[in-house]
Image (cartoon, coloured by chain):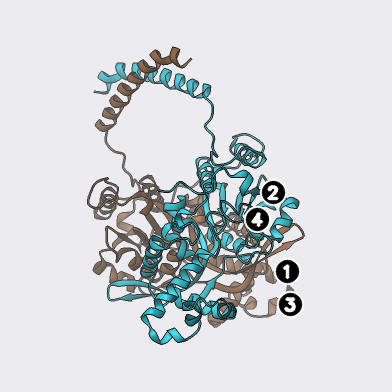
Chain colours: A cyan, B brown
Amino acid sequence: MLHAMGTPSRRGFLAAMIFLSSSLFSVGAWAQPDPLPSWNDGAGKTSIIAFVEKVTREGGPDFVPVEERIATFDNDGTLWTEQPMYVQAAFILDRAREIAKDNPDLRERQPYKAILESDRAALAALGEQGLADLVAATHSGMITTAFEKTVANWLATARHPRFARPYTELIYQPMLDLLVYLRTNGFKTFIVSGGGVEFMRPWTEKAYGIPPEQVVGSSGKTSYRLDGDTPIIEKLPTVEFIDDGPGKPLGINRFIGRRPVFAAGNSDGDLQMLQWTTLNTGPRFGLIVHHTDAEREYAYDRTSEVGRLDKALDEASKRGWLVVDMKRDWKTIYPPRR
Amino acid sequence: MLHAMGTPSRRGFLAAMIFLSSSLFSVGAWAQPDPLPSWNDGAGKTSIIAFVEKVTREGGPDFVPVEERIATFDNDGTLWTEQPMYVQAAFILDRAREIAKDNPDLRERQPYKAILESDRAALAALGEQGLADLVAATHSGMITTAFEKTVANWLATARHPRFARPYTELIYQPMLDLLVYLRTNGFKTFIVSGGGVEFMRPWTEKAYGIPPEQVVGSSGKTSYRLDGDTPIIEKLPTVEFIDDGPGKPLGINRFIGRRPVFAAGNSDGDLQMLQWTTLNTGPRFGLIVHHTDAEREYAYDRTSEVGRLDKALDEASKRGWLVVDMKRDWKTIYPPRR
């Protein structure tokens, strides 16, 4: 059979080679498609493309082997909108309202009373311990699969107060372009966020193409038990790890075990991740999203309670990090409405 | 130019299609290569192949989408030899000897005295706290990059007491076959081990093809600081997480965030990982390596201090886990000497 097929196969092979080489020539004659179509042309876009081209040029002085191409992205304010409050904070408040609805006794007690009455002063007075208790009350005492469903259900119905769209639609199109561009060039993209890891994993794959196993975040302790023949992991009301500020390089070291080549953030909570990534030998890229667009999104930096960008902004020029001016550099902010 | 090329391209395209289809037919006429060449034919090998074929058969009732194909492997005793003592324990003893050599004061103090004199009774009397102190003394007070080098240097020179080969050569060829077979079929392979994550990551990619970001293990706390313009992560003498027993499903939940479809272990420390993997809806595979080969490796199970297999062996038949009989099922144990 092989012998009988020898002649047509060989003839076919030569034809295929001719076909392939002519196709390659045709592609070469066409203009390259824009790898970052939602970015305006300018120094920022140019520097990203120049970086990716140099680290992927085999045999070049700045070549980075594919397995070392680790890129880490903060989430809140870097991949999606974090104003007027962190999305997870909105989730916590809604969860607390639900809990109070089911437990009338709680309605007259803090922090539930303040939440139900939208009493900002009382909420601010809760302090760190009060907030930690609130997180514990809304994030523990349930099994992981139930929490996952709660998050998914909430995201399906909750709407952003200003844009009236689901939060998972308020993701930045230019950053989606960047994620795809990096992955097309062999980068493995990770989220490294101060947000709860179990709050993010149910939706990051669909929203960003980042699978659960590439999401690093804050976490609470958990416990395992066998309930009959059903294994259960329960969420406990104790903080395990805060993946913010100096916690980010520690989280990267613990979860990824390699130093990134590329890191993107937008606030002082990302300062140490940017240092850990860029203050290293070899080519490295640090990027800060600067929120400068009050019209299409929000404008805030040094004095904002949410996503404050102060020290990292000062350090950016010293370290050569790209500061993206959202208003100037981004052609669009969000993906089109579905 | 495009127009001029139209005719030959189109002709080439048709020829390429003919070539491709004839190639496909030829491949179909050949025998499939054995995907597990180091495994003897038998029920074990057959059941692994049947499982992989059914979960990858698109449109079949047991099809598992590629992103859900998570496979987790214990390391000690599952991927490499753990007798006569865990490799990391041999590392700790050698490190302690080095430390005592550099610090004469320590030589007369425990546990160093017992280690230098190979005094097994005194070592056994150290207890849990003594052992924890020993781990702390040999694994902390240095920066992560220095520890990585220490591990790599030790592995380059240390030899197994019986086989006189580097530990990283005492990995199981049949398990390497299995890792490659699963990856070829779209599985993402992870290590989930009680061993220290920073003890494993320097060599798992080369030995098993498993990159650092797919290694889950036990860890100590760390701290971050900027030393001038050099970011540093220091290893602290405090346990952060023990990835063993019930810690394994917790580690999987925290680091991977998906339930595996396939899990392999060899001891009671893997019991909960096997439960978490297999007691779930949909097709799941649990595998236990049973050490039955005193001649080519070691024979041990219910009463062994290292890698005890007792409860998990009892549970295997009830749960339908494959118990691999090393002596009967494995054609070879280790890769050939280099």
The answer for which chain carries disc 3 is B
User: Residue at label 1?
Assistant: B102
Query: Which label was assigned to residue B290?
Result: none
The mark lying in front, picked from 4 and 3, is 4
Disc 1/disc 2 C-alpha distance (Å): 31 Å
> Do dots 4 and 1 share one subunit?
no
* Residue A194 found in image quarter: bottom right
Disc 3/disc 1 C-alpha distance (Å): 9 Å
> Do dots 3 and 1 share one subunit?
yes
Query: Which label was assigned to residue B105?
Result: 3
Q: Name the foreground residue: A68 vs A191.
A: A191
Disc 4/disc 1 C-alpha distance (Å): 37 Å
Please tell me whether mark 3 sits on a helix, a strand or a loop: helix
User: Residue at label 4?
Assistant: A274
Q: In the rendered structure, which amino acid carries the disc numbered 1?
A: Asp
The mark lying in front, picked from 4 and 1, is 4
The mark lying in front, picked from 2 and 4, is 4
Q: Eyeballing the image, is A211 above or below A31?
A: below
User: Residue at label 2?
Assistant: A281
The mark lying in front, picked from 3 and 2, is 2
Q: Eyeballing the image, is B95 above or below A321?
A: below
Please tell me whether mark 4 sits on a helix, a strand or a loop: helix
From the top left corner, tell me how far across and down residue B335 is, in percent. Answer: 44, 49
Q: In the rendered structure, which amino acid carries the disc numbered 4?
A: Leu
The mark lying in front, picked from 1 and 2, is 2
Disc 2/disc 4 C-alpha distance (Å): 14 Å
> Do dots 3 and 2 share one subunit?
no
